[in-house]
Image (tube, helix red, strand yellow):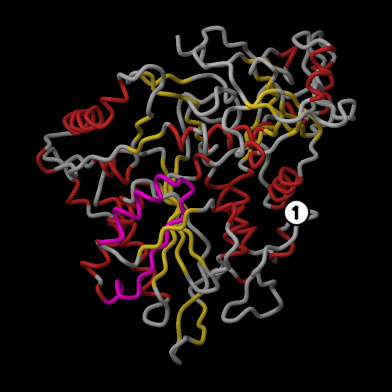
C-alpha cells in the first residue's frame, strides 16, 4: 500500500500534538541526520498541550533535536531524522530540496506536442476526452512505474496554448503601450516558467503583432530548477534571443532592477510554503507549529509560543490591514465568557481545534518585489479555493499520483518529495498585504537583525525617477514623469484589481479561438476557482 490506512485524527484532547506515521511504507530507512542541539535542556517549550500521546521521555527527545531550516536541509542528500523545524521549512524541504524534493525529482508538467483544435471538438465532454487522451499519452510511462513515479500535472498555460499566453501578452502590451512606450524597454520577469510554454506564447504574440514593441522586449525567467532552466534555455533562445534564464530562487534575489518592468507569477504561489498556527483559548495568543522528525522518520506536530520574526511580522501586517484571523472569525472566540466555560469542560483542548495556515513565504516574495523591483507591475494568477484540502483554515491539498490514480491525504506531514502540497490564495488578503508592503519604506520591511544585501539602494526622499513608499500606487489615473527621451512617460500604478479567471479572459482572451462547435468555451468554463491580480 502506498498510503498508510491508519491516519491519526486530531482529537480535542491532543490538539497541539499529533504523531503521524510515514506515508510511504516502501521508503528505505537510510536518512541523513544533523548534529543534535548543544543544549538539550534549553527552555524550548514544544509540547504545550499535555498529551497522552507523548510521554515525558518522548518530550525530552524533541528537546534534544537540532532546530533546522530549509537552507540547512538543502545540503542533505536524504531526508533527515532527529530534527525539528518550522512548518514552512518542512514544506519547503518536501517540495524543493534539490536532492529529494518533489519538484526537482518527481514533477513533470504536461505539455502536448500540438495545441488542441478547439473548433474540431463538439462540446465540453469531447474536450475532456481529448485532454484525457493527451494526458495519458504524456504520462503513460509514469502511470506504470512502481511507487509514485513521475507526477504529471497540467496548467492552463499548457491546456490552452497558445491562447492563454496570448491573453497574458495582450494584457501586458496594452499596459506597456499606455505607460512606457517608447521611452522604456518592455521588460518582463517570469517566475517559474515550467516548460517555457508561456514565455514562447507571449514572445511569439509580441513579435507577430507588435514588432515595434518586440524590438524593445527583454524577457527574463527566474527559475529555481536547474533541469527546467536548461530546458527553457534550449527551447527559447534560438527563436527569441531576448530571453535570459536566471537559475536562482527568487528568495535569494540580490540584484536591484531600478527601471519599470512587469513581473508574472502564474500558478506559482500555490506552492509557496506556509506556517501553521493555533491560538490558546485562554487569551487567543497564537502559537507556531514545529514539525519534529524522530529517529524512525515519524513526524510530530508540536506547538510553541511564537518566536519567529517572519511569523510575527506577518501577524503585525495582517493586523494593520485589519484582516481577522480565519481561525478566530467565529463569534465563539470573541466571547471570553464562552471560552472560559468551554475550557472548564472535561478534556477540553487548550488550543483552537483546527490549525490555520498563513502565507509567510508569500510575504517574503512581496518584500523582494518591493526591495529589488521598485517599479514593477505584478500579474499573478492562482487558485482562490481548492477542494479536498486537509483539515484547517486556508489549508492545502496534499496529494500524489500512484499508477495513474490521484491519492489525496489528510496531513501536510508526508514523506518528503513524494507529494504535491499546494494552497489556495486569499486574494483579498494578498491584495491588501501587497498594497501595504509596497507602501512601506524598505528599511521598515527588514526583520530584526537582518542587513541589506549588497547593491540595494535605501529610500532617501526622492528616488529618481519615482518616489517609492506611500506613492507607489496612484488612486486615480497615472502620474506624469520626465521621460528618458526628453518627453513624458506615464508611470505609477493604479491599485491592483482582482479578476476572476473568466473576467480576465473575457477582457484579454481570443474567445473565438477556443470556442467549441456547441458554442461552449472551455477557456471560460474551466478554472472557475482561479483568480488574477493585476
Query: Could you tell me which residue is drawn at 88 percent across and 30 percent down?
Result: 39
Query: Against 396, is 145 above or below?
Result: above
- Please say whether residue 338 is visible from this viewpoint: no
Assess disc 1: are there few (<14), some (14-19) or many (≥20) residues with their C-alpha within 10 Å of its C-alpha: few
Instruction: Write down the residue under mark 1.
Output: 447
Count of number-bearing discs: 1
- Quarter of the image containing the N terminus? top left
- Quarter of the image containing the C terminus? bottom left
Q: Position of residue 58 (x, y in %)?
A: 79, 14
Image-based side of 404 in relation to 464, left or right: left
**Range covered by the magenta-colored residues:** 212-238
Q: Position of residue 519 (x, y in %)?
A: 15, 41
Query: Against 382, is 165 above or below?
Result: below
Q: Secondary structure at mark 1?
A: loop
Query: Against 501, is 369 above or below?
Result: below
Residue 146 part of the magenta-drawn span? no
Image-based side of 470 in relation to 377, left or right: right
Amino acid at each position: 500500500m502506498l498510503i498508510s490506512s491508519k491516519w491519526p485524527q486530531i482529537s480535542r484532547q491532543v490538539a497541539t500534538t499529533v504523531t503521524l506515521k510515514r506515508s510511504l511504507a516502501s521508503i528505505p530507512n537510510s536518512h541523513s541526520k544533523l548534529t543534535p542541539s548543544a543544549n538539550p535542556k534549553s527552555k524550548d517549550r514544544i509540547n504545550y498541550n499535555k498529551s497522552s500521546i507523548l510521554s515525558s521521555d518522548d518530550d525530552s527527545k524533541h528537546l534534544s533535536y537540532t532546530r533546522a531550516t530549509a537552507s540547512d536541509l538543502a545540503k542533505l542528500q536524504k531526508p533527515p531524522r532527529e530534527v525539528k523545524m518550522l512548518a514552512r521549512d518542512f514544506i519547503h524541504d518536501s517540495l524543493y530540496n534539490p536532492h529529494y524534493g518533489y519538484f526537482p525529482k518527481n514533477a513533470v508538467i504536461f505539455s502536448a506536442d500540438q495545441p488542441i483544435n478547439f473548433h474540431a471538438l463538439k462540446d465540453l465532454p469531447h474536450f475532456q476526452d481529448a485532454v484525457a487522451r493527451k494526458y495519458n499519452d504524456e504520462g503513460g510511462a509514469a502511470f506504470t512505474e512502481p511507487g509514485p513515479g513521475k507526477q504529471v500535472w497540467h496548467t492552463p498555460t499548457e491546456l490552452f496554448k497558445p491562447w492563454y499566453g496570448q491573453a497574458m501578452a495582450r494584457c501586458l502590451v496594452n499596459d506597456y503601450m499606455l505607460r512606457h512606450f517608447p521611452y522604456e524597454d518592455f521588460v518582463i520577469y517570469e517566475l517559474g516558467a515550467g516548460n517555457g510554454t508561456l514565455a514562447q506564447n507571449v514572445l511569439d504574440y509580441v513579435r507577430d503583432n507588435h514588432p515595434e514593441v518586440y524590438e524593445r522586449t527583454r524577457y527574463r525567467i527566474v527559475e529555481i530548477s536547474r533541469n527546467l532552466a536548461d530546458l527553457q534555455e534550449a527551447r527559447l533562445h534560438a527563436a527569441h534571443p531576448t530571453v535570459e534564464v536566471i537559475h536562482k530562487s527568487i528568495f535569494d534575489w540580490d540584484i536591484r532592477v531600478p527601471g519599470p518592468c512587469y513581473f508574472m507569477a502564474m500558478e506559482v504561489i500555490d506552492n509557496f510554503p506556509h506556517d501553521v498556527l493555533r491560538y490558546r483559548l485562554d487569551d487567543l495568543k497564537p502559537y507556531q507549529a514545529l514539525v519534529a522528525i524522530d529517529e524512525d522518520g515519524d513526524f510530530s506536530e508540536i506547538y510553541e509560543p511564537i518566536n519567529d520574526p517572519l511569523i510575527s511580522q506577518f501577524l503585525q501586517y495582517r493586523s494593520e490591514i485589519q484582516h481577522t484571523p480565519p481561525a478566530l472569525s467565529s463569534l465563539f472566540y470573541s466571547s471570553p465568557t464562552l471560552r472560559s466555560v468551554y475550557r472548564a469542560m472535561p478534556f477540553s483542548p487548550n488550543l483552537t481545534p483546527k490549525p490555520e495556515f498563513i502565507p509567510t513565504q508569500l510575504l517574503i516574495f512581496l518584500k523582494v518585489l518591493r526591495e529589488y523591483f521598485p517599479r514593477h507591475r505584478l500579474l499573478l494568477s492562482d487558485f482562490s479555493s481548492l477542494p479536498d484540502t486537509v483539515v484547517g483554515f486556508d489549508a492545502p491539498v496534499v496529494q500524489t499520483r500512484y499508477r495513474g490514480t490521484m491519492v489525496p491525504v489528510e496531513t501536510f506531514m508526508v514523506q518528503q518529495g513524494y507529494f504535491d502540497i499546494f494552497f489556495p490564495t486569499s486574494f483579498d488578503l494578498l491584495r491588501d498585504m501587497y498594497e501595504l508592503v509596497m507602501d512601506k519604506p524598505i528599511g521598515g520591511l527588514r526583520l530584526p537583525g537582518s542587513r541589506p544585501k549588497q547593491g540595494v539602494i535605501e529610500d532617501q526622499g526622492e528616488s529618481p525617477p519615482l518616489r517609492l513608499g506611500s506613492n507607489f500606487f496612484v488612486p486615480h489615473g497615472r502620474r506624469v514623469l520626465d521621460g528618458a527621451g526628453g518627453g513624458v512617460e506615464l508611470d505609477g500604478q493604479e491599485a491592483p484589481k482582482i479578476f476572476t479567471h473568466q473576467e480576465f479572459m473575457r477582457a484579454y482572451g481570443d474567445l473565438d479561438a477556443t470556442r467549441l462547435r456547441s458554442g461552449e468555451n472551455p477557456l471560460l468554463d474551466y478554472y472557475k476557482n482561479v483568480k488574477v491580480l493585476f
